[in-house]
Image (spheres, grey):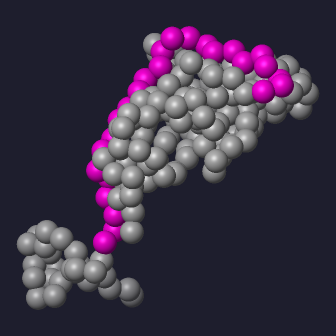
């Protein structure tokens, strides 16, 4: 048989008395979190030629430009309506300027429907990037598409969380 032994002591200390890892082992940490909840109703994007501001914004002030920001945007309904039409695409802008690392209309994702009449997908999109400033930055969701919809309501909100992380 297999026997399992619990670790009860580490470096001659009981597990319950350890309050930090030994020096030199830094796992990073979250120093600030902000959540924005959008319930204003469906946003429809009908511009196929360029990205447009969806009106979904989240302003965040980082504590240090040495840190990174993790953006997590969850939505119950990313919806691409026309069959075979121009795909729906999303990216994030900072203070209404493209972020170079994701400077493409599909920088965070692309939704395309090849059959049927509609595609509705629930899920999250993420971006992990630099904290550009210690002043307030307005992050905005920009999109492009033929008939691409970001569905949200009081019972199915879009939630945008930004976590500021110290990285090592």
Task: Magenta stretch: give its range.
Answer: 26-50
Q: Where residue 32 appears, x then y in whole percent?
A: 30, 45
Quadrant in the picture for the C terminus: bottom left
Task: Depth check: give the residue in front, 81 or 106.
Answer: 106
User: Which residue is depicted at the point 28% across and 80% down?
Assistant: 24
Q: Is residue 119 visible?
A: no
User: Which residue is depicted at the point 50% across and 25% down?
Assistant: 57
Task: Depth check: give the residue in front, 104 or 74.
Answer: 104
37 part of magenta stretch = yes
Quadrant in the picture for the N terminus: bottom left
> From the viewer's perspective, is residue 137 above or below residue 31?
above
User: Which residue is depicted at the point 38% across and 86% down?
Assistant: 2
> From the viewer's perspective, is residue 6 above or below residue 144?
below
In which image quadrant can residue 14 be found? bottom left
132 part of magenta stretch = no
Q: Where residue 120 appears, x then y in whole percent?
A: 70, 26
Q: Where residue 97 appears, x then y in whole percent?
A: 60, 34
> From the viewer's perspective, is residue 155 above or below residue 130?
above
Q: Where residue 46 appears, x then y in whole percent?
A: 78, 16
Left or right of 76 on screen, residue 160: left
Q: Is residue 76 visible?
A: yes
């Amino acid at each position: 048989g297999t026997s399992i032994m619990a670790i009860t002591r580490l470096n001659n200390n009981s597990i319950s008395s350890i309050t930090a890892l030994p020096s030199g082992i830094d796992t990073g940490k979250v120093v600030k979190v902000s959540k924005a909840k959008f319930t204003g109703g469906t946003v429809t994007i009908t511009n196929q030629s360029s990205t447009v501001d969806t009106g979904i914004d989240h302003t965040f002030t980082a504590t240090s430009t040495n840190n990174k920001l993790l953006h997590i945007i969850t939505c119950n309904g990313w919806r691409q309506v026309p069959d075979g039409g121009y795909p729906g695409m999303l990216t994030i802008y900072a203070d209404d300027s493209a972020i170079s690392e994701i400077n493409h209309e599909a920088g965070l994702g692309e939704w395309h429907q090849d059959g049927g009449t509609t595609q509705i997908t629930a899920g999250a999109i993420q971006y992990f990037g630099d904290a550009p400033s210690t002043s307030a930055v307005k992050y905005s969701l920009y999109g492009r598409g033929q008939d691409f919809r970001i569905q949200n309501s009081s019972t199915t909100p879009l939630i945008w969380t930004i976590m500021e992380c110290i990285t090592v």
